[in-house]
Image: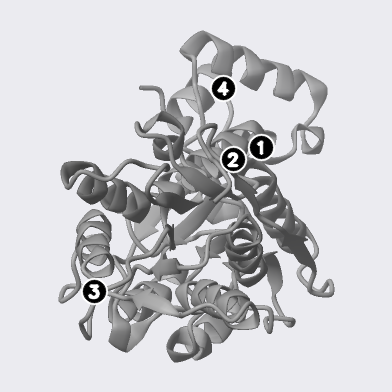
Amino acid sequence: MAKIEDVAKLAGVSPASVSRFLNNRNLLRDITAERIQDAITKLNYSPNPIAVGLRTKHTKMIAFIIPSMNNLYYIELFNDIHRLCIEYGYTLCLYSVEEDLDLLKKILGELSEFQYEGIIISYLDEPEIFDEICRLRCRMPVVLISADSGKTDFDVVYLDVRDATYQATKFYIDHGYRRVAFIGGGFSDGLRIIIKEKKRGYEEAVQEAGCPVLLDIPKGKTFFDAPDNMTAGILGAHDMMALPEPPDSILCSLDIIAIGVCRYLSENGYCVPEDVAVTGFSGTTLANIYNPAISTIVQPLNEMARAALDLLLRRIKEPESDPVRRSFCASLRVCRQFKNR
């Protein structure tokens, strides 16, 4: 592989002249620039992007931090942002903290050492970590993808998960379902904002209608104490269907939890959605291909991905600009077999 010294030798100039050519060829005389360009072409020379980034402070690298690799939604969100980054000539680097806020603090403290131009943090703006995020913002551009309506001093892509869950719960109640249950992910002693907001939307809808609150949240103090999301759905369905009056509809905080619910119901003689309607949250590929069919609350994934990257690139270009908030809604997509009660 050719080096800058090889180009300089072939062109009969100094390495410093080649460097000036790469940064701005107009700084050199036309005849010198032409000799360097000819040498670059003959040697098939390509500048080291990391070295160029260190020199120009533009590394074209962006970090993307997600709560967990176990949730397909975050993988699909990463894929959408990654595709857009390629269009803009950026490299996207993925970090997964597996719901561990201590690990997140460590990563946030180290990110500035890796010459990233900016960071996108997805649904991890918890109160326990917010001071670290604020400190990081002093060193580099940060965009949040958040379910917290109170974030106003950051560039934010906001999804109103509370209202989405409220509307989905109300839909079932309005169609004759009177015992609507909610099965959440995470763990009861440390629910993240996004799960709290979904739970809150569900509770508001059932209490408003005078229906019972039927909740199941995995027990535990840390991510490692709680079951994985599929198992959370299986165990939650077991608990719900063991009630003296089991639910006629179950809303889940994630599609993968809904699939765990469906698995339990199918293996125990229940028909979905005829006996129990099941609804997930996210609109991932799993919800589209799973049989029996499940309903799901669909997020506008492509639009949110583009908004997050657009906000970050704007912040990189205009570091002193005012914070911008882009708000999105999710909507219920009902499976074909759905019937009124």
Is 234 rendered above or below residue 29? below
Mark 4 vs mark 3: in front: 3
Q: Callout 2, which amino acid?
A: Cys
- Point out residue 81 in the picture as x, y percentages from the top left corner: 57, 44
Question: Mark 4 touching mark 3, by CB under 8 A?
Answer: no
Query: Mark 3 or mark 1, which has the lower sequence index?
Result: 1
Query: Mark 4 or mark 1, which has the lower sequence index?
Result: 4
What residue sits right under mark 3 in the picture? 223
What residue sits right under mark 2 in the picture? 85
Mark 4 vs mark 1: in front: 1
Is 297 rendered above or below residue 22? below
Question: Separation of disc 4 and disc 2 at Cα?
Answer: 38 Å
Question: Separation of disc 4 and disc 3 at Cα?
Answer: 62 Å
What residue sits right under mark 1 in the picture? 88
Residue occupying image coordinates x 26% and y 63%: 241
Residue placed most toward the observer, 323 or 210: 210
Q: Callout 4, which amino acid?
A: Gly
Residue occupying image coordinates x 63% and y 21%: 36
What residue sits right under mark 4 in the picture? 12
Question: Mark 2 touching mark 1, by CB under 8 A?
Answer: yes
Q: Callout 1, which amino acid?
A: Tyr
Question: In which quarter of the view is residue 23 placed?
Answer: top right
Q: Residues within 10 Å of mark 2 (few under 14, many from 20)?
A: some
Question: Separation of disc 2 and disc 3 at Cα?
Answer: 31 Å
Query: Mark 4 or mark 3, which has the lower sequence index?
Result: 4
